[in-house]
Image: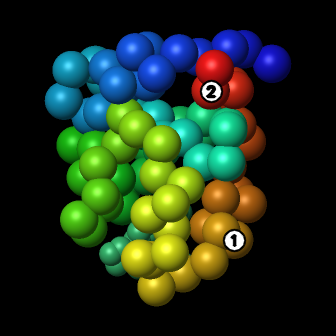
Amino acid sequence: MREITKQQLALRNGQDKPEIWIAFRGLIYEVTESRLWKSGKHYEHWAGQDLTEELADAPHTDQVFEKFSPIGRLI
Ligand code: HEM
């Protein structure tokens, strides 16, 4: 699986590059096409970073990731 650094992830925050990525439990997910992650913002959360810990704040479970295939692994 493609290895992605924190720096590469940080640029995919919905502001600096067209792609929007988030990291969750060591894997990178692309949410560019999601209307819920427009401009990299999802409620009070920003893309381009590891949001594993923040899932506890969400009203949903990790099931929201099931429809996405990871594009890489955070190193
Ligand atoms: C205040 C915090 C949050 C709120 C209110 C929120 C709300 C929502 C809502 C309403 C949905 C629609 C689907 C559903 O409810 O099952 C959703 C989807 C999703 N959420 Fe959250 N969420 C929050 C935090 C997070 C965090 C921290 C993450 C990442 C760890 C996350 C990742 C996702 C993903 C990947 C989807 C699926 C998007 C899609 O299907 O296009 N959410 N969220």
Question: Label 2 is placed on what type of residue?
Answer: Leu
| Quadrant into which the N terminus falls | top right
For this orientation, the residue located farthest to the right is 1
In this rendered view, identify the residue nearer to me: 66 or 52: 52
Q: Is residue 73 left or right of residue 19?
A: right
- Marked residue nearer the N-terminal end (2 or 1): 1
Q: Quadrant of the C terminus?
A: top right
Which of the four quarters of the rendered structure image does ligand 1 lie in?
bottom left
On the image, the x and y values in percent for residue 42 come to: 31, 60
> Please, what secondary structure does the residue beneath circle 2 have?
strand
Q: How far apart are marks 2 and 1 (CA)?
A: 20 Å
Would the CB of label 2 be found within 8 Å of ligand 1?
no
Residue 44 percent across, percent down from the top left: 23, 65
Q: Position of residue 39 (x, y in %)?
A: 22, 43
**Residue 9 position (above or below residue 55):** above
Q: How crowded is mark 2: few (under 14 residues within 10 Å), some or many (20 or more)?
A: many
Residue drawn at x 32%, y 20% is 11
Mark 1 sits on what residue? 63
Q: Does the residue labelled 1 lie within 8 Å of ligand 1?
A: yes
- Res. 38 visible in picture: no
Mark 1: secondary structure = helix
Residue 74's mark?
Answer: 2
In depth, the one of 5 and 19 nearer the eye is 5
Amino acid type, callout 1: Gln
> Colour scheme of this structure image?
rainbow
Residue ID at (46%, 21%): 6
Horizontal side of 5 relative to 13 (left or right) equals right
